[in-house]
Amino acid sequence: MKATAKSPANIAFIKYWGKTDLKSRVPENNSISMCLSDLYSRCTVEFRKDLKTDEIEFKNEAVVKEKEKERIVGVVERVRRLGGVKWKARVVTENNFPKATGIASSASGLSAVTVAALGALGMKMSEKEVSKLARLASGTASRSIPDGWVEWVKGRGADDSYSKQIFPVDWWQITDVVGIVTHKMKKVSSTEGHALARTSPFYKARIQGMKEKVRKIKELIKRRDFSRFGRLVEAEALNMHAICMTSQPAIIYWNEATIKVMKKVISWREEGLESYFTIDAGPSVHVICEEKNAKEVAKRLKKIEGVKRAVINRPGVGARLLT
Ligand code: DP6
């Protein structure tokens, strides 16, 4: 009754910000992402007869909030109910990057717990059903289930919203060089941010444009048109952050290093090193470039004041059972 899973973080090119159903995490719009090859979580779940309560351990983490543990217990509880099992579980989870800093730790962490818990009970489900289950823990976790380039479909409601592959891992050699700029957890969680999105006066306008953006990005990925793809990705990130900054209360996820990296990326581009930035709900910056430029981008990123690490990611596989 024990299994270990490994699951990647993912980066959204067209983002999920705002939900039509907060509790079931039904997004306001479809989103498009890529699984990351080198940033991931590993999680072991063991259901045991002798346990009185679920035990959650985060390896190598100084600060763990009660809410984070509750989310993991929520996954275990759902899987237990589906499997008709009463035993409590011991969960040990670890990331190879700092959590809650804009690198989708809830995506990798909670998809890993979902897959490990199902594996521990020997339960087999379709990829679609697993992505729905992971979505209930964290919206972006549903996008870490399929391999490669992924679309999370909004659907008609909680039973119909899931993620699927749109292009395989080897479709296009794009890299996401992540500039990690902090190890501190963000103050406002994504879940809180999603709930505030509607208070922005610009939210309606954002949502009206999403269908067309999703259509466009899929076409650009299909054509492997890097320049148009990059411009759209960057504009989309700024659009999402404009909603955060104009929510009430306002949320500013960036810090000084975030802005320094953004400005540098723009100037590198002007010099001929073509790269674009995107940013999730945190200060770390994802620099998107073609594989041939990844090492140079990483080298330059590391020289920027405030950048602690630069991690090169290629398109990666989704969640996997290791045992
Ligand atoms: C900013 O999945 O962290 O990364 O569903 O409430 O857990 P919850 O939110 P979460 O949303 C983060 C969204 C984003 C953009 C994106 O990846 O699409």
Image (cartoon, helix red, strand yellow):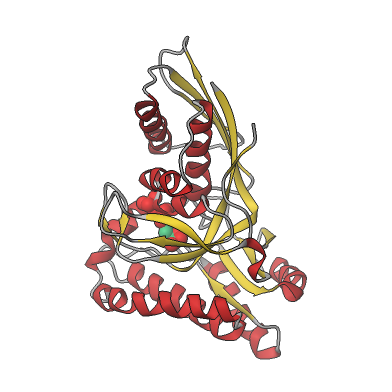
Q: Nearer the viewer, residue 221 or 252?
A: 221
291 over 27 or under it: above or below:
below
Q: Quadrant of residue 68?
A: top left
From the top left corner, tell me how far across and down residue 165 is, in percent: 51, 60
Task: Please report the residue visible at 56 percent of the width from the left and 74 percent of the height from the top.
Answer: 277
Q: In the rendered image, is residue 290 in sight?
A: yes
Q: Nearer the viewer, residue 116 or 138?
A: 116
Q: Nearer the viewer, residue 98 or 278?
A: 278
Give the quarter of the figure containing the C terminus.
Answer: top right
* Ligand 1 quarter of the rendering: bottom left
Task: Please report the residue visible at 42 percent of the width from the left and 60 percent of the height from the top.
Answer: 152
From the top left corner, tell me how far across and down residue 234 is, in percent: 50, 78
Q: In the rendered image, is residue 306 in sight?
A: no
From the top left corner, tell me how far across and down residue 209 is, in percent: 33, 79
In this rendering, the count of numbered labels is 0
From the top left corner, tell me how far across and down residue 206 is, in percent: 31, 76
Task: Please report the residue visible at 29 percent of the width from the left and 47 percent of the height from the top.
Answer: 24
